[in-house]
Amino acid sequence: MATKQGMCKNCGSLVMFDDRDDLCECVFCNCVFPSKEATEILANPGNYEFKNEKFEKQEGTRHYYSNPVMPDIVEKAVKRDITSKSQSDSAKLKANEFEISPNDVKAPKKLVIGMAVGAVAIVAIIVAIALPMFLSRKSLTEAITADFDKVFDSTSESNYEYKQFDIYGLSCQYVKVGVSGDMTEGDAQQIYSNYVALRSDKRGDASGDVEMYIYTPDTIYFISKDGLTKDVQEPLEIIETTEETK
């Protein structure tokens, strides 16, 4: 079987037909005429007059050849759906291997449990380390605070009108002291030594890593195990905190 081309004798359109068919049909004007005549007209169309008459489409045998450009995807989809429904559950069409389902992204149960246990263990370790340190520091701070007046013993002016202090650091190694009167370098050094001794007594060891600031109205002393330094500043009035000044 071979497909041949010709020209419609009615409208001049291109027609295609099987070389075994005696008749051909124009898909544009529905004119049916001999295939041989269509071939002759195509070879020499200038000698023909195209009348462009109207013809009704004939039902039954088709006298033309057509080749679909693309398959009917809708029809195939319907057939596929019918076939799938008619099959048993075990013989259904295979799921798309590249499609991700919710089950594919769920973490395994063992992994979730392991992560939860690990998180709890980390928190427990942090608490086990930090809590004793916090309680130890709190206890030491309270013990030093209770006897802090001893820090001013053996100084030339132990009865200041106003004294305040701030103890901080993990082992209470930092302290700031404020007094309302002037102070000599000897008194500042004595206060430092007294605090070191008090802290060592409460801790139970003789660690000397203490750093102390002493604030007076006109001088700031910084004292550590390396010695004493002072910074002279403008006179500063230290006011005692009372109910009226809060």
Image (spheres, helix red, strand yellow):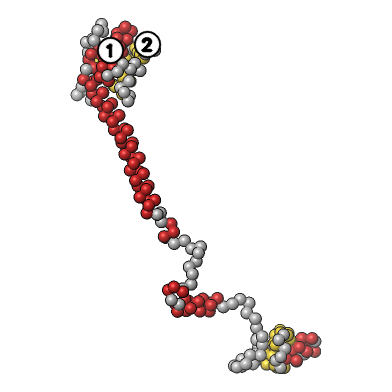
Q: Which quadrant would residue 107 be assigned to in this image?
A: bottom left
Say the numbered circle drawn on residue 1: none
Q: Nearer the viewer, residue 55 or 157?
A: 157
- Counting other residues with Cα less than 10 Å from the Cα at mark 1, is it few (<14), some (14-19), or many (20 or more)? many
Q: Which residue is mark 2?
A: 228
24 left or right of 227?
A: right
Percent x, y of residue 30: 65, 90
Q: Secondary structure at mark 2?
A: strand
Q: Amino acid at mark 2?
A: Leu
When the figure is inspected, residue 97 is found, relative to residue 188, above or below; the finding is: below
Q: Amino acid at mark 1?
A: Asn
Q: Quadrant of the C terminus?
A: top left
Q: Nearer the viewer, residue 154 or 6?
A: 154
Percent x, y of residue 112: 37, 51
Q: Which residue is mark 1?
A: 194
- Counting other residues with Cα less than 10 Å from the Cα at mark 2, is it few (<14), some (14-19), or many (20 or more)? some
